[in-house]
Amino acid sequence: MRICVLGGDGYCGWATALYLSQKGHSVAIVDSFVRRQWDRELRVDTLTPIRAMDERLAAWKRRSGKTIEMLRGDITNYEFLSSTIQSFHPDAVVHFAEQCSAPYSMIDCEHAVDTQVNNVVGTLNLLFAMREFAPDCHLVKLGTMGEYGTPNIDIEEGYITIEHNGRKDTLPFPKQPGSFYHLSKVHDSHNIYFACRIWGIRATDLNQGVVYGNVTNEVSEDEALVNRFSYDEVFGTVLNRFCAQAAIGHPLTVYGKGGQTRGYLDLRDTVRCIEIACLNPAKPGECRVFNQFTEHFTVLQLAHLVRDAGEKMGLNVEIDHLPDPRVELEEHYYNPRHTKLVELGLQPHFLSESLLDSLMNIAMKYRDRIDPALFLPRVAWRKARNQRLVVHAHQPSTEVHSEAPNSVREKADLQPLDV
Amino acid sequence: MRICVLGGDGYCGWATALYLSQKGHSVAIVDSFVRRQWDRELRVDTLTPIRAMDERLAAWKRRSGKTIEMLRGDITNYEFLSSTIQSFHPDAVVHFAEQCSAPYSMIDCEHAVDTQVNNVVGTLNLLFAMREFAPDCHLVKLGTMGEYGTPNIDIEEGYITIEHNGRKDTLPFPKQPGSFYHLSKVHDSHNIYFACRIWGIRATDLNQGVVYGNVTNEVSEDEALVNRFSYDEVFGTVLNRFCAQAAIGHPLTVYGKGGQTRGYLDLRDTVRCIEIACLNPAKPGECRVFNQFTEHFTVLQLAHLVRDAGEKMGLNVEIDHLPDPRVELEEHYYNPRHTKLVELGLQPHFLSESLLDSLMNIAMKYRDRIDPALFLPRVAWRKARNQRLVVHAHQPSTEVHSEAPNSVREKADLQPLDV
């Protein structure tokens, strides 16, 4: 198949592009590289030293003999996006090209607006470009399990049949997202569902859980193919952050009680789910929703798993409970259905000791690159304006202005949040 | 109370500002006048010759002795909006300041994007400005009944209690909006609900039906206070368009079978509902939803009412059924609850012969200003790009480029839509 991967320079996008290329699909990456720019803005960095795109693609060509096309541009520019769709004429478009961090969207008004405008406009442009220039193309859109929030009933895959006052209808599952980022995905979902109804677009909305793992078969083939590993409080997902903390003897930062339950999946399952969706396209006019995760854990369970993995390596791992900077239930019912992808052939990689060992090994390998000032939450949901500038341990303080502590060991100072 | 009316130059906003001022509230209008600019962009105009804002406010001062403050600016500019909130320190903000036309949002990608960005960013800015500078202020936000779509179950006021697999929760009512404009209001609703949860904002989300009527006690006091009357296919609501059509002997343009049922209310009830909401504010953290309409009608019922009113005046009124340019059910179940405003004291003005007579009289008074080229639908939901330029009957064709017919009588040419 001809598959466009929007956001193919990102964590999931890069692994997906390589996997699809390896599987023999013709792949084009579309990316503006704004994700790297956001790292620079926040003075954070991937733990693993990722390479420039041309170096990445040259290494892939050298290792696999396969060429991935690269189209640089911003999908919020309709002219760019529509000409890309016209020139590549994809069978499927996999859309990862969104601002993907909840804390980023909660920094202040500007970041909330930027997140929603970036994400909503990109997806709107894509829907129009598909309607105008690729009406039979299949949209595979990355949503998030966070769209649903944590209702006190079972979560279905996208739609729920409601009986009410003696009548019945199947309607979109009610959404209670927990950040301006998660809200942007809910907005997208509504826009996509509408475009399917009026234009007959084919769409699969993948409500993905939290992805862990850094390595796929493809990524591990060459040092130049290394994948992003974010561990900071803004872009890092919780398991990455815990591993980085364990590697340098920093306490694991559990927010609140740690009973927050979320769906998780291995990066190797993400790439497989994307291919499954592409190979089994939605019907014209169908807006299909899959809940894309394989297991669920509480945050505290993950902390215990990382502690165990660390102790096996001789590390002494403490667990700290910080005041929760988010507004979320710290204990709640959580039972989302996730059978559709399995019915289409997904064979899950469940979270294992060996996966945790592999993550810990990456964290240990690059431990000199870990900046502990990036661990502590500095974005509080309850505040409308957060001062996100931090002093980097390895940068002189003249460069930035902040009340942040200089040392990770000054624990009393390390909770600047009024949550 | 001190009340800010965002979008106070518009149809509902202007009538509301005058009503609240008459009732003794301190009122400030905030407006960028972009609504007048959209008229110019589409080469449409209000049937009633509305005056410039300074003339309007001077007339109001002369007639009532009361002063309404005017703050000119765009609420998508956070600096402007937040400084306005800080300087006026309102008890309530009534937010009408959005692009309000479904067809406008469906013209093409640019108009869809502009609509969603304008509406979503304005509301986001307002939420942040309230959190930062007026945390106890009450947001009274205009949503639309169109957020719900036409589900096959009774529509509740904002939330529905769902029993599912033996568990129960009360969740936001599922939304199935029917245009990119209606979608923007759904996005707003989700953003507002979230802001209430995390920041304790007080909000009332008014899911308003289609408003009819042009006159309130205040508006009718002076010719310079005259209210907007849009009758074109983009900004005109159906009853206005039918009256203008009847006035010049043009067939009433019913889309499809005309069984589309919607909630309606009189403009005099709109202004009263707004005051009721302001005087009975939501509690901190509460996102209260009222369905703001008083009756529901099918489009065909309204056509029959206008025909009857016209015939009483000696007019010969035909009814045409055009192919529906929208994607909507032409016949459907519709039973939305609307009791909360009545419980707070609303005494509805139901649609009456005298109201229809008053609308017909306005249409007759200004019939020379009616441009029949503006009646016919030129925005098709199923197309991704609509050519909206039309030839005005009273403008030479050199000014604009279009395949539109020059005369309203060339009926065969008058259905340019491929729907």
Image (tube, coloured by chain):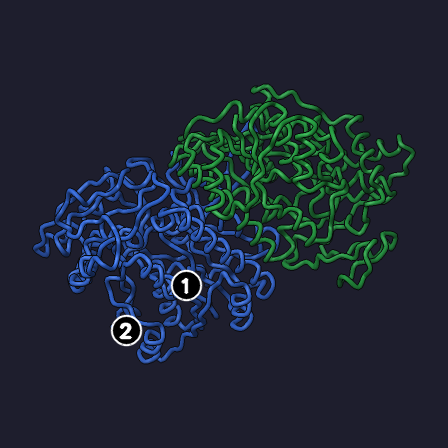
Chain colours: A green, B blue
Q: Is residue A50 left or right of residue A186?
A: right
Give coordinates of residue A345: x percent, y percent: 59, 19
Q: Is residue B256 left or right of residue A82?
A: left
Graded by Cα atoms within 10 Å as few (under 14), some (14 to 19) or many (20 or more), the crowding at tag 1 reads many
Which residue lies under the disc numbered 1?
Answer: B7
Give coordinates of residue B278: x percent, y percent: 46, 62
Element marked by disc 2: helix
**Which picture quadrant has residue B299?**
top left
Q: Nearer the viewer, residue B191 or B171?
A: B191
**At 82% from the left edge and 59% from the top edge, which residue is drawn?**
A396
Element marked by disc 1: loop
> Tag 1, which chain?
B
Q: Is residue B178 visible?
A: yes
**Which picture quadrant has residue B136?**
bottom right
**Residue B224 has which mark?**
2
**At 40% from the left edge and 35% from the top edge, which residue is drawn?**
A197
Which mark is first along the chain, 2 or 1? 1
Quadrant that contains the C terminus of chain B: top left
